[in-house]
Image (cartoon, coloured by chain):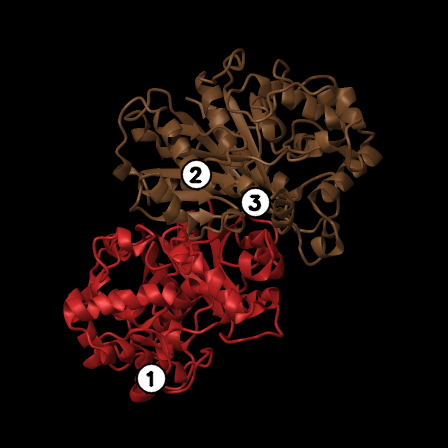
Chain colours: A red, B brown
Amino acid sequence: MSTGVSIIAAGQSSYGLFPDRTLKELFYDARVSCFHTLDRSLEPAAIDEAFIGTLGTGGSQLGNFAPLMMEAAGLVGPPATHVENACASAGFAFRAAVMAVASGQAQIAMAGGIEKMSDLPRERNRSWLGVSGDVEWERLAGTNFPGIYAMMARRHMFEHGTTKAQITGVAVKNRQNAIANPKAQFRRALDLEKALGAPMLADPFTLSDACGITDGASMIIVARDDIARQYTDRPVKVLGVGGGTDYVAVHDRPTMTELAAARRAAKQAYDMAGLGPDQISLAEVHDCFTIGEILSYGDLGFCETADAGRMISDWTTAADGRLPVNVSGGLIGKGHPIGSTGTGQIYELFHQLRGTAQGEGRQLSNPSVGLAHNVGGSGGVVAVTILGAA
Amino acid sequence: MSTGVSIIAAGQSSYGLFPDRTLKELFYDARVSCFHTLDRSLEPAAIDEAFIGTLGTGGSQLGNFAPLMMEAAGLVGPPATHVENACASAGFAFRAAVMAVASGQAQIAMAGGIEKMSDLPRERNRSWLGVSGDVEWERLAGTNFPGIYAMMARRHMFEHGTTKAQITGVAVKNRQNAIANPKAQFRRALDLEKALGAPMLADPFTLSDACGITDGASMIIVARDDIARQYTDRPVKVLGVGGGTDYVAVHDRPTMTELAAARRAAKQAYDMAGLGPDQISLAEVHDCFTIGEILSYGDLGFCETADAGRMISDWTTAADGRLPVNVSGGLIGKGHPIGSTGTGQIYELFHQLRGTAQGEGRQLSNPSVGLAHNVGGSGGVVAVTILGAA
């Protein structure tokens, strides 16, 4: 099965801190990178529809984001929609673009994502990101995202015997992967002992368990399967797109070691694709904190929830393991420009599935199916995308 | 032609200032109002997908809006997406919900919209709304929305001889219509002479030419045509949904008396519906300022741009005229809770097309086709929806 939709082009700006580049310039970087992956010309006017993810307004003080970014990309005219689903904004923007094509409304649609976090001072970023939790029940009680994810980590350790070394091992793995990614922000190896001894963030997390502050943008173009090869010799198939919601506050959920929204999103995507977790060749998952990746293994069906920690300690998900996860470096190594992350993950899968991943030794050997897992808040809203090599 | 999608239920909270009701309560009001229009039971779990429009985060300090509003409506589980396209947020949320059903992703989808403007002081509302203009080129130069729309009004007067009495006549008409609408905010007649003599807002506008500050929410449920009658005996058909973008700053556009985004959106919706402006029975248009409605007449093809003022002075668009526009009271009479407005317009059309409009003397006589026109900013992004009686 499939959605009848293919990716024909995918681009991404470098991820990092770019105080000297504007939001519009970053989005244009993604646009140039995207159009460069085409094999034949695509007139901007051929793009029928666009969805652009950003948390944005709080940070940049710029509103009416969708037409503003269409301007920045030289694409004024077609309908464009700003999608804001916290850190899952671009995953849902992509999903909506796929639906636009599948519905017949569009033949070709664009999904983009962007965030320029360096426009805000660090303290202001923290308060701004905090509204994506349950403000009335979590934030006003003093809880923040490091604290919420730390509780999930503690609970995983308590219920399943997951170790701190396994959890922080996610950061070690992903930082290692980022070294070979020329567009990643943190291209330095992380030593496990040093990471465990780094300044405490929220027990059991040290600073090494969290992603950083990142600027970046990404852009994906999708088209009906039957016209995809007019623009590229190597399209990538969209096999399934899923989404799900859950209670925003973790205390309203029956468990802290599973994200119900992720399980709903995964089921929808797997059902649409007509395949299961054992057919996934590689995954890009939402490691905003190290535990996020551990949770994803259970939620995506890669293993039982209780076994997730061992996927790290036995190197199953390392770049040369059985199921490479976050070969891009993930949110911790590559960076997490909030609104760009979802389409940034899809950018990585697109290139891996085509065999065009940049950077020495980064390209996996003939992966056939890739999965992206993009989480908003602490799991209030999750998008899962499954792509297949053509 | 059609989209293959029907509206099976539509609800709206009262519009007004409700400082004692929370955002979540207002959305629940819309949910109750919506489900009450069903003839047979719809299990919440049958809703496969949702899109919720709000400008919201700035005003309420609540983020992760989509899952938060799903919680408030008792609909946790399915994928939900927060759409933010300035004042056109809900028009685009509706359009995305229609695409979700047309794509086969969903059988039944919800589109909602909400804003609680009274959570902010009046001055703060002004600054918050201002970001939906082109911040770098308009707002930082001191321009605001009253000023931008006033320039459009001045230009319409200069180019086409439109009179101040015609422009302000929009407010007189819409306030008159609002009197019979039990859910409208401003249910008092407006005298033209008094309106023209009211305190100046931005020449040629007095305070009477602008909409107010409003709280409110709305919710629409759409389903595949072939299952619509499982839930209602009187569905309303979605004939066409269109969208368009334009340069956000008015100085980048070739004209100030047309909104290119509205013309693009209208063309797309008319083409999809397979009909033209002369087949429209009634319209709900975006009169955030009086000139907005005058502009819409030309952009929607109801008349030549130059003749738009006369549509008001000869009462063509009065409730008992040839083409009633804003029988709900419009944004000026019914109210303009930013993120709710688009689906609030569709709520009005739904009831008019079914013959169930509440309020003495409000129901039009057998309208067959209704159009909604929802503008973001000063025309950077516009959605147009065309509905037909079943």
Tell me, for residue B120, which label it has, or none.
3
Label 1 packing within 10 angstroms: few (<14), some (14-19), many (20+): many
Q: Is residue A124 left or right of residue A341?
A: right
Q: Chain of mark 1?
A: A
Mark 1 or 3, closer to the camera: 3
The residue located at (29%, 88%) in the rendering is A193
Quadrant of the image occupied by residue A172: bottom left
Mark pair 2, 1: CA separation: 45 Å
Mark 2 lies on a secondary structure that is strand
Q: Earlier in the sequence, mark 3 or mark 2?
A: 2
Q: Which residue is mark 2?
A: B112
Q: Amino acid at mark 2?
A: Gly
Outermost residue on the front side: it is A141
Q: Say which of A329 and B124 sits in front.
A: B124
Q: Quadrant of the N terminus of chain B?
A: top left
Mark pair 3, 2: CA separation: 22 Å
Label 2 packing within 10 angstroms: few (<14), some (14-19), many (20+): many
The residue located at (40%, 48%) in the rendering is B66
**Residue A369 percent across, percent down from the top left:** 28, 66
